[in-house]
Amino acid sequence: MNKLYFIFSCLGLAGGLLCCTGDILFDLKGPGNKKLGTSKNIDSNWIKMSDWRFGLSIALALLGDALVCLGFYSLSMQIAATHPILGYLTLGFGYFGCFAGILIHSLCCLQALIYKGAMKRGSLEIADDILEKIYKQVMIPFFAGYISLLAPTVTVIIAICNGALDVPKICVLLNPLIFLIFGLTCRKINPVKFQDLPGIIMPSLGLGMFGLIGMLNLM
């Protein structure tokens, strides 16, 4: 069983890296990008990006999150061996966060395609009107998904601190929240140099770290 869990954890790490690749395809917009629209949820450089990038980004996010779920399963079962409630909370919130992530990422990619189509046939005002309606409707699941990923971050930190996971204590830093803060800090320090990377891949890379923690616990 430990061998299977180790394989699942490896796949979880690989899934996080696939999600990073999907994030780059969608969110690496290049220099000169401007935030447009009522809620500033439109990127001007979308118009320059090839359509295939968004389709491939959705596909990679779908596959990546599926593999991340395997990583969550492995890590959760390892925790549940000694702390069942903690383990199953990690599993439930982790799965919900991954499913929400697929939905959110797909909608963001579709927004870019809608914007490109609207700009070819209409104007920024038309594109903004359409995308603002979509944006308002996805905000609740968007924040619910992000908040749900805070739960497994907390449960894994607890599992590391109480010894349920036999890994170095520094592993409490290997999670989406810490990685997100790092990415935002880089962008704050130099908004031009760090406009896209590393910030755009940090949450996905943090998800992959749950797979790495599972691997370390089994070594």
Image (cartoon, rainbow, N blue to C red):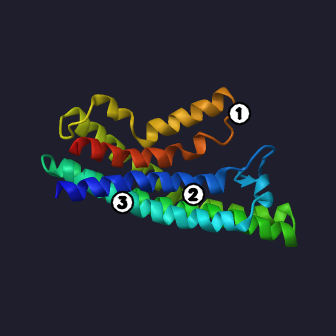
- Residue type at the position of mark 1: Lys
- Residue type at the position of mark 2: Gly
Picture quadrant of residue 209: top left
**Mark 2 → mark 1, Cα distance in angstroms:** 21 Å
Which of the image's four quarters has the C terminus?
top left
Left or right: 17 as drawn, with respect to 217: right
- Residue drawn at x 29%, y 57% as measured from the top left: 7
Q: Position of residue 19 (x, y in %)?
A: 51, 55
Q: Who is closer to the viewer here, 80 or 126?
A: 80
Q: Position of residue 143 (x, y in %)?
A: 50, 52
Q: Who is closer to the viewer here, 216 or 57?
A: 216
Q: Determine which residue is flagged by label 2.
A: 22
> Against 199, is 98 above or below?
below
- Residue drawn at x 49%, y 49% as measured from the top left: 204
Is residue 9 visible to us here? yes
In the rendered structure, are the residues bearing label 3 and label 1 in contact, judged by CB atoms less than 8 Å apart?
no
Picture quadrant of residue 97: bottom left
Is residue 89 visible to us here? no
Q: Position of residue 173 (x, y in %)?
A: 38, 33
Q: Secondary structure at mark 2?
A: helix
**Mark 3 → mark 2, Cα distance in angstroms:** 17 Å
Q: Determine which residue is flagged by label 1.
A: 193
Of callouts 3 and 2, the N-terminal one: 2
Q: Determine which residue is flagged by label 3.
A: 69
Q: Secondary structure at mark 1?
A: loop
